[in-house]
Image (cartoon, rainbow, N blue to C red):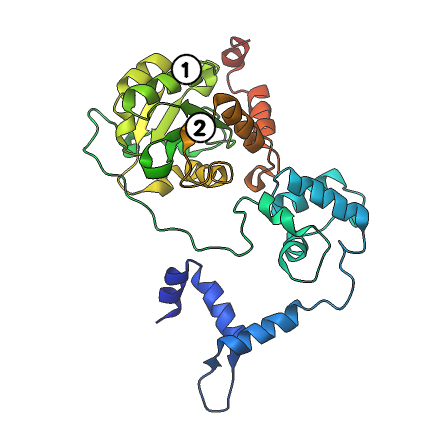
Amino acid sequence: MSKAEIAREVGVHRSTIGRELAAGSTYFPDRRPKYRATVAQAAADRRASRPKTTKLAGNPALAAEVARRLEEEHSPEQIAARLKIDFPDDEDMQVSHEPIYQALFVQGRGELRRDLHKRLRTGRVLRKPRRPVGQRGGSKIPDMVNISERPPEVEDRAVPGHWEGDLIVGASSRSAIGTLVERATGFTMLLHLPENHGADTVAAAMIEAMSRLPETLRQTLTWDQGREMASHVRIAAATDLEIYFCDPHSPWQRGTNENTNGLLRQYFPKGADLSLFGPDYLEHVARKLNSRPRKRLGFKTPAEALDELLSQPTDPHAVASTG
């Protein structure tokens, strides 16, 4: 198989495969390099060996701060970035994300409690290839407007009020939770759907949630072609949203929402009965996500980014009128 074929098979970029082959191959004169997994693993173990004391092991205050933020379910990358922001003049209280991962997962380290890996989004020690993109069945939704007709300014994340939405589905598709994510900031709202996730139920929950927002935050909504949006005309009329639908099997057209749904699986595992999670817990989870620092926001939180955008509106009267 070629590098590109291997990369697709295992779910990584082909350059990652190239680097692994280069690092793990044995080279002979006048012969092609030979990759052997055992040789590559031994080399990786040698590179990972750390005879000296690591920064976390030698700094209990830093280790305690990292552990506290892991308890708050921040990722190692988020922790590393925020430490630089929160302790700009104290290099002893700064550490990159890789030592945090190493402290959690490499045997014999002991700088951080081993059980803290459960606070990471995946809860796993090893990464897992991304699952194949699923397909959503069902006939075409009447009167839907395709994403190709969505105004081009929606692509510009400088203006808030453009949303992406979807359902995360529980065991045997019997239960679901609605997810709404604001494109500019990643600010998340969750829709409680305790009885079913049919079109009427989803419409009622979405109208109630969107009606709580100021008018300036209700511009557009992009969804996939699931039958739960069959009442989109009713939703649009009640909320003043312009609703657009993605092309079939094109989840990247609402990538912000797809990423957020992945984060939510930390709280709502696959195979769970999602109807058991009440509205208070959904609000708690939304607050968790909205207070996590995000890399694309310069490690501000979605809540901070949304407040900043609303405090500097392009139309001051639109925000002022919301109180």
Q: Residue at x 54, y 47 (%)?
A: 123
Drawn side of residue 72 relative to residue 278, left or right: right
Q: Residue at x 28, y 32 (%)?
A: 226
The secondary structure type at the circle numbered 2 is helix
- Frontmost of labels 1 and 2 is 2
Gap in angstroms between the C-alphas marked 1 and 2: 20 Å
Between discs 1 and 2, the one toward the N terminus: 1
> In this orientation, does residue 186 appear?
yes
Drawn side of residue 278 relative to residue 107, left or right: left
Drawn side of residue 137 relative to residue 153, left or right: left
Q: Is residue 55 above or below residue 49?
A: above
Question: Label 2 belongs to which residue?
Answer: 276
> In this orientation, does residue 153 appear?
no
Q: Residue at x 47, y 69 (%)?
A: 18
- In this rendered view, identify the residue nearer to me: 308 or 227: 227
Question: Label 1 belongs to which residue?
Answer: 208
